[in-house]
Amino acid sequence: MNFMTALKDAWRRNDSLVCVGLDPEPGRLPAGLSGEEGLFTFCRDIVDATADLVCAFKPQIAHFAAQRAEGVLERLIAHIHDKHPGIPVILDAKRGDIGSTARHYAAEAFERYGADAVTLNPYLGRDSIEPFLERADKGVILLCRTSNPGGADFQALDCGGEPLYIRVAETIAREWNGNGNCVLVTGATWPEELGRVRAVVGDMPLLVPGIGAQGGDIEAVLTQGRTTDGTGLMISSSRAIVYASDGPDFAAVAHRAADEMRKSVNLFR
């Protein structure tokens, strides 16, 4: 599957810019679900309940690895590809290293887990990202202006009259995106800065975390970040959807939460 083609198709087919983050927390599964099977059932049921409402799923690798459940993650991604073909899967791993290590990380994301895209940290430079950029069929999702409060510690530093995050955006858009497979992470909590990134990168897709529990504003994100055709964004929400209910109705309530978010987003497209 080509990531960019699948993403554009999902935007259109599901009329959705919503990306559901799959971040299962120990101790937060509904009663009766436990262990690896409970973890798989929980995530699978969330996926099955929301697949017709989203443009992507984004499992967070640490939430599985910390529970020694990498096998569950492999099964989950395989399930998404099997039961919901055409919905791209982003492995949220934020990898970044050099040489053979970078190549092993690329193999981990794309061969072991079967992800369609992976999040990466670009601050070691192009050679740390090259093994991912070479995979023209895969999405290369690079941190730019992140949603956390501490992101400004470095990302906002002056760099020749522009903040560093703008220099990152310019470099990726002009020099790294030869295969047209790059995406930037720009937090919903900084909508004006998201708008500055959009102005620099044109129609490049943006992954936008920070809606929901982190307090990002949907209208501001759409105003600043959408492309002229009303797409260009993957607006990610995890806790507000995945933990919308802790009861046996968790999947049905997750469906309602995802649908409400999709409708809210679409009001401003």
Image: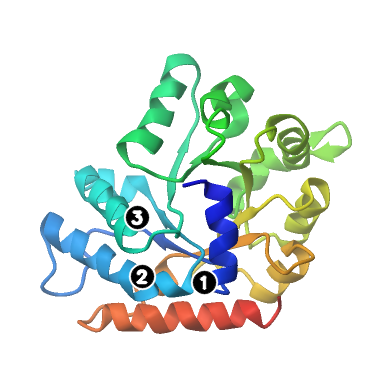
Q: Are marks 1 and 3 in contact (CB under 8 Å)?
A: no
Element at label 1: loop
Scheme of colours in the image:
rainbow
Residue 241 placed where, x, y %? Answer: 41, 73
Tell me which amino acid carries mark 2: Val
The numbered disc on residue 81 is 3
Q: Amino acid at mark 1?
A: Gly
Could you tell which of marks 1 and 2 lies nearer the N-terminus? 1
Task: Calculate the distance from the C-alpha at mark 1 to the C-alpha at mark 3.
Answer: 27 Å
Residue beneath disc 1: 212
Q: Name the residue furthest top.
A: 99
Secondary structure at numbered mark 2 = helix
Element carrying mark 3: helix
- What residue is drawn where x is 51% and y is 40%? 138
- Which residue is identified by label 2? 242
Q: Residue at x 39, y 59 (%)?
A: 85
Mark 1 to mark 2 CA distance (whole Å): 11 Å
Above or below: residue 39 compared with residue 185: below
**Nearer to us in this view, 157 or 203:** 203
Residue type indicated by callout 3: His
Which residue is at a point 41% across and 84% down the rendered structure image?
Answer: 256
Between the C-alphas of marks 3 and 2, the distance is 20 Å
Q: Identify the residue shown where x is 58% and y is 31%.
A: 133
> Looking at the image, is mark 1 or mark 3 earlier in the sequence?
3
